[in-house]
Amino acid sequence: MNLKVITIKQPWATLIALGEKRFETRSWQTKYRGKIAIHAGKSVDKKACDEDEIKRALLKHGISSYKDLPTGVILATANLIYCHKVKEDYGKVGKIAVTESGLIIKGDEYCFGDYTEGRYAWELSNVERLAESVPAKGQLSLWEWQLF
């Protein structure tokens, strides 16, 4: 059985696995809907880990350093339910974005993504963190993971 996977840079992959981040922002959309695995890529954005909103969210779960973030592993599964196209980004005035579907993204969720106009917010639901992360080599775009 195969499962679609998306590779995401840290700390964002962990924020999704912890249930802190509901949208993954991308420059491209996908028609795929359904179960998807969340893969933490090999790289960590250390500067992002020092941003107040991200630092606070990670600390809430006992993660105090970027060194504690797993890399090169599948961390969680989720359902990809929709791809929202960002229509307007009011980041400079209020950390708010509006999608073409009328969804308003604000607060920490806004800080956890890149909501530049024209980008896509992939909406995830039913995130389930794996009891044990599974080592895997990431890839670009959506890729297939053979479960067994």
Image (spheres, helix red, strand yellow):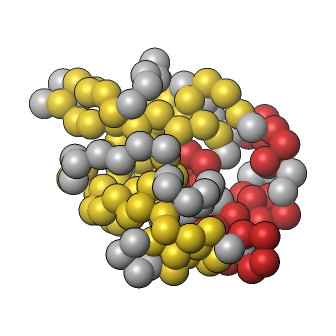
Image quadrant holding the C terminus, namely: top left
Residue at the spot x=78%, y=48% of the render?
Answer: 48
Q: Is residue 67 above or below residue 59?
A: above
In the rendering, at what x and y percent does residue 18 appear? Answer: 55, 59
Q: Is residue 101 above or below residue 59?
A: below
Q: Please indicate, yes or no, whether residue 19 appears anywhere in the rendered image.
A: no
Q: Quadrant of residue 81?
A: bottom left
Q: Quadrant of residue 97?
A: bottom right
Image quadrant holding the N terminus, namely: top left
Which residue sits furthest left? 1
In the rendering, at what x and y percent does residue 22 appear? Answer: 48, 65
Q: Which residue occupies the foreground of this view, 3 or 112?
A: 112
In the rendering, at what x and y percent does residue 51 appear? Answer: 84, 57
In the rendering, at what x and y percent does residue 121 appear? Answer: 45, 59
Q: Is residue 99 above or below residue 14?
A: below
Residue at the spot x=41%, y=43% of the render?
Answer: 28
Is 124 on the left-hand or right-hand side of 95? left
